[in-house]
Image: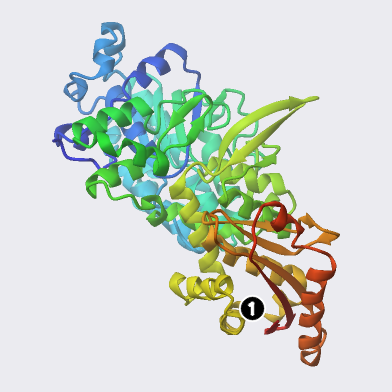
Amino acid sequence: MQGLPIGIDDFAKVREGEYYFVDKSLAIRDFLDNHGEVLLLTRPRRFGKTLFLSMFYYFFAAEQGQTHRALFRGLAIESAGERYMAEQGKRPVLFLTLKDVKHRSWPDMLAKFRFLLSDLYDQYTYLMDGTDFSRAERRYFQRIHDGEASPVEMEEALRRLMDMMKRYHHQPVVLLLDEYDIPVQQAWEHGFYEDCMAFMRNFLSAALKTNPSLDFAVLTGVLRIAKESIFSGLNNLEVSSVINGTYADWIGFTPEEVRALAHEQQQEAALPVLHDWYDGYRFGEQEVYNPWSVLCFFKEQGQPQPYWAHTSGNALLGELLKQTDTVQEDNLLRLIQGQTVTAVLTENTIYPELADNPDALYTILLLTGYLKIVSRRLIIDTWIYVLAIPNREVRSIYRNEILSRLSPGRTTSYLMTTMENLMAGNAQAFARGLQEILMKVASVYDTANREAFYHGLLLGMTTLLVPEYEVKSNRESGLGRYDLAIYPTRRGQCGVILEFKAADTPDELTKKAQEARRQIDEKGYEADFQARGIEKVLKYGIAFCGKQVVLV
């Protein structure tokens, strides 16, 4: 069996090292047949974008007069015909990745850009052997190369380098830019968004907008950042995303590719497990597996785990979940239970909109790989999308991220024990566990929201019970609407009804808890359980005051 190229994103290393390669080279044919001037490919993290772009680099570029034709021997693009292979090694190519521009302050990020551009210019020092450059251009080249350029000079670095390359090679340049949106995401997370956007807008627009030195450009990232005017006025931009579904099979593994890989690894019996854990993505009409997790699965001899959970991109999920309100938390619980949510999506979403636009949250969760499109319908002139969690791996990531927010410093096993006490009727043990969690994670600002905060806290804790139990929040039953109910999915298990009250003072806690408990009986909240044939139901009234709790 061939080795698996886990973590190797250089196409030449994969081919020369004789690693197993899922052949995506026909994408070159599709691109040559249809390409415009600027293509933006947006896909989730760890789906193979860098390796894909590296393949483009080795196909189009010539280095010191030598092409890389041997790397494509036996691949599908070679069989597609000589008219395509005649394009191999014919263009000057500039390849830059921003995947490592991850910093917590704008000065540090700007310093990283300075080093990155210095290294980039160092690859093209041969240009200074040309005679068609002025003294000013040579001084500019040297300042970028030596890391002495100002931010304004750095904003022009791509455009000016492309101009020099065109004049030296006597033909326009191919620009390949990988993970272009990493700096923007980092800036949003760490509070210097506007500074970063101002730089990136000029940095990219100079290279992509009305640039006579540009042959064509391919950019990869997760989001289409448009409203910030990074691509303002760029009329030559084509976007391939998980929403519109163009070039859907270019990035990620198709079912056919996973079956071929399973056969090569002699693990065809593992296909149902792979489907359950790592399939479920849909890019347009194309079914797609997470390639990172599939490769890790085979490397670990068929052991299913949430491998994607250990990648850096999951920090974004934590930041997004901080923005949720109680309605979105309820929707999140429904998603974890295998249900769907409905939203209006827009690829022109920007991070600052998250606090005010619920649909912006769902758009970013979709584009980053945490949701999939189940269906869509056109109502008047607006597309309405039905969304769901794609697979078991992502459901596990949601659960773990929610639990880590609820109880930093506490293990999942501790939370599980607390919930087991609830389901077993050990009321006081559950109350003690809940009290300790409140003391650990709650602030006076949280508890000022009264019942909404406590409701959200317990909703998050119940994710540990899914899928063995079904959790419902604020649903009608009997003569009223309960706060939280937990329904068993197997016969013989007991159900749970929870009603919450907020007390103004600690002295009122017991009275309020008893009032909540009586309400369950008076309103007949047990009716829905009886209709489902669930005979045993545990009923809890819980009262909160600040970080104190009483349960009866």
Amino acid at circle 1: Ala
Q: Which residue is mark 1?
A: 442
- In the picture, the quarter occupied by the C terminus is bottom right
The residue sitting at the bottom extreme is: 507
Residue 238 location in percent, x, y? 55, 24
Answer left or right for 168 relative to 542. left
Answer left or right for 21 relative to 205. left
Q: Nearer the viewer, residue 341 or 42?
A: 341
**Is residue 345 in view?**
yes
- From this view, report whether residue 212 is shown above or below residue 540: above
- In the picture, the quarter occupied by the N terminus is top left
Q: How many marks?
A: 1
Where residue 522 sits, quadrant-wise, is bottom right
Q: Nearer the viewer, residue 29 or 516?
A: 516
- From this view, report whether residue 104 is shown above or below residue 447: above
Residue name at image x 46 percent, y 70 percent: 412
Residue 456 location in percent, x, y? 67, 65
Q: Secondary structure at mark 1?
A: loop
Residue 341 location in percent, x, y? 66, 43
